[in-house]
Amino acid sequence: MRAIGIAGLQLDLDKGNNLDRIAAEARSAKARLPWVDMLVASELAAYGPSTEFAEPEGGNAEMHFRKLAREIGTWLIPGSIYQRIGDQVFNTALVINPEGEIAARYHKIHPWTPYEKNVASGNAIGVFDIKGTGKFGISICYDIWFPETTRAIAWQGAEVLINPSLTNTIDRDVELSIARASAATNQLYVFYVNGAGRQGFGRSIVCGPGGEVMHLAGEGREVFALDLDLDSAERVRERGWHGLGQSLKSFRDTRMAYPQYQEDVRSPALDALGPLAMPQSESGAGASKPGDVLTPEHWTKSKRN
């Protein structure tokens, strides 16, 4: 049986340096749940959503988390951090093995533009192997809104998608639907960890390869752990969920050349939407000026039903 225990750290974090807090939570989770093989935190958990904390590769946060993974002997995905490479800043997820080595370094392909300003886009799909267990995919928050990203991860054989996020906006319910749809259409597990408290709305979700909800967290701090059976995901891909649709086989076998993926082909309909820009007030009352930067403190936490 190919199985892995994964714990999500949905933490109530503040702006600034959270490295020691994350380390304490990770140590506590591993001590309480020694069967867990991997710990996953939320997007930008280490310092919060500000590029002023961007560090170079091999910087303080990276070395801190490498030491932590080695200390507790567990795979660690500490959410993401802003990393500076040359004159560019990337939203970067580190995948660290139990020996404290960087097994994968994934740069967010789809920064949340126009809100996530001055952040460059990655250009490589995030996948990594755990020997004897299977292949895993990694994306970050807004990436999951683009089905092409998750499909590319499944196309490369990943049976589990890890997605750290930082959402404190009214669309969290929509993201939960996207998580379920992504799991079902790509026949993989989705392990989707959001921030809580001041940073995020919580409500992390874990979905099975049929799109079924395995766990839905509350809004506050929560550490949750699940045992994922990768043989079950393989069976779903071979037979369909409960013997139903074999969607990945159908995608593999289609001869359709989708027009949106043809080289140098533009969509007149999408071009007509205009530039990607910050929405402005249509009434003119209280409008922000073009170029204003909206930080999380400006985003209203709307009450959900």
Image: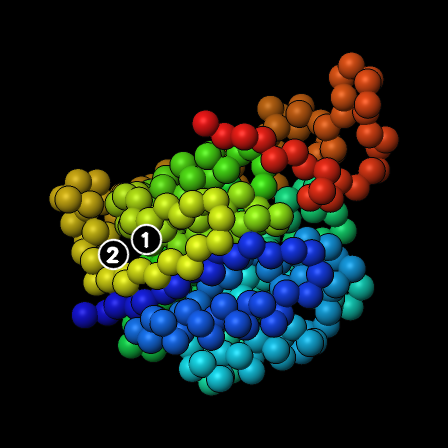
SS of the residue at dot 1?
Answer: loop
Query: How many numbered circles does the render carry?
Result: 2
- Circles 2 and 1, Cβ within 8 Å, touching? The answer is yes
Q: Earlier in the sequence, mark 2 or mark 1?
A: 1
Q: Is residue 154 above or below residue 268?
A: below
| Residue that badge 2 annotates | 233
SS of the residue at dot 2?
Answer: helix
Along the line of sight, the residue nearer the viewer: 305 or 78: 305
Q: Is residue 13 above or below residue 300?
A: below
Q: Is residue 1 visible?
A: yes
| Residue that badge 1 annotates | 188
How busy is the neighbourhood of tag 1: few (under 14 within 10 Å), some, or many (20 plus)? many
User: In whole angstroms, how far apart are the C-alphas of marks 2 and 1?
Assistant: 6 Å
How busy is the neighbourhood of tag 2: few (under 14 within 10 Å), some, or many (20 plus)? many
Q: Quadrant of residue 251?
A: top left
* Residue 212: % across, % down: 28, 43
